[in-house]
Amino acid sequence: MTKADIIFKANIRKILDEGVWSEQARPKYKDGTTANSKYITGSFAEYDLSKGEFPITTLRPIAIKSAIKELLWIYQDQSNSLDVLEDKYGVHYWNEWEVGNTRTIGERYGAVVKKHDIIGKILKQLEANPWNRRNVISLWDYEAFDETEGLLPCAFQTMFDVRRVDGDIYLDATLTQRSNDMLVAHHINAMQYVALQMMIAKHFGWKVGKFFYFINNLHIYDNQFEQAEELLRREATDCLPRLVLNVPDGTNFFDIRAEDFELVDYDPVKPQLKFDLAI
């Protein structure tokens, strides 16, 4: 059982045993009923990627390639266009959050990245002084929120720091998430931002270090309790999954592609579980 599996089971158990019920919940299921949830606040986990600790469970399959494609859409294309996401990457699930008939998700995610040239600024200041303490990505933009409707960003803040250890420079990352669906999105979001961390590290020829993951509201929806119990019953496989970025050190951030990533030694428990999406 991996560190991620241990943390996953502990969080599920804690939410089921100690969680409280949401009130005035915003999300709905596809049939229009309110998607209530049980939740805990203030969840934190630490993974040392340099030691092979990756935040992905083996208790059910996690779709990494589509998650990485979504990440590229946000931080490389810097787009909010659903047409770009579908035509370039073949990813369709964001259609549920289309704003009106605009074929966009509103002024959110990639639109905010582009508006503030966030990646350009992060790369520039890391190059100028890797030890600066101002490498912050924030997608929380009240001005953008006032401009259009749209889903407010869940994984909204990322911070980066470097450490020199025995002559090697390691890039650490901290992801802060306001809200997270423990059973569906938890490991997808975590691995997306590990991929982002790896892309920035490769850009500079550094090693990946630690990944810190803080979630303010960690929840399980009220139609997922059966799946939660099934996950608690499952025994993890013996695999030790790790994400590898197969490009040379110094590869430009914007030249990295989804196919450059490889999930090695990943043999998750099957069958996959079915979850109804809360929108």
Image: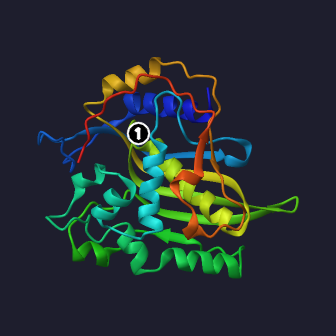
Q: Residue at x 71, y 79 (%)?
A: 129
**Residue 198 vs residue 32, the one in the foreground:** 198
Can you give x and y, in whole percent of width and height, for residue 209 in the image?
70, 54
**Residue 94 vs residue 3, the one in the foreground:** 94
Can you give x and y, in whole percent of width and height, for residue 213 in the image?
54, 51
Q: Amino acid at mark 1?
A: Met
Residue 105 placement: quadrant: bottom left
Please give left or right for residue 37 compared with residue 247 in the image: left
Residue 56 placement: quadrant: top right
Q: Residue at x 38, y 73 (%)?
A: 112
Q: Which residue is mark 1?
A: 182
Is 269 above or below relative to 27?
Answer: above
Q: Callout 1: helix, strand or loop? A: loop
**Residue 206 vs residue 143, the one in the foreground:** 206
Is 51 above or below relative to 177?
Answer: above
Residue 121 in view here: yes
Is 82 above or below relative to 215?
Answer: below
Residue 177 in view here: no
Can you give x and y, in whole percent of width and height, for residue 176 in the image?
48, 57
Can you give x and y, in whole percent of width and height, for residue 114 in the image?
41, 77
Please give left or right for residue 90 compared with residue 12 in the image: left
User: Badge 1, how many Cα within 10 Å: few under 14, some, many 20+?
Assistant: some
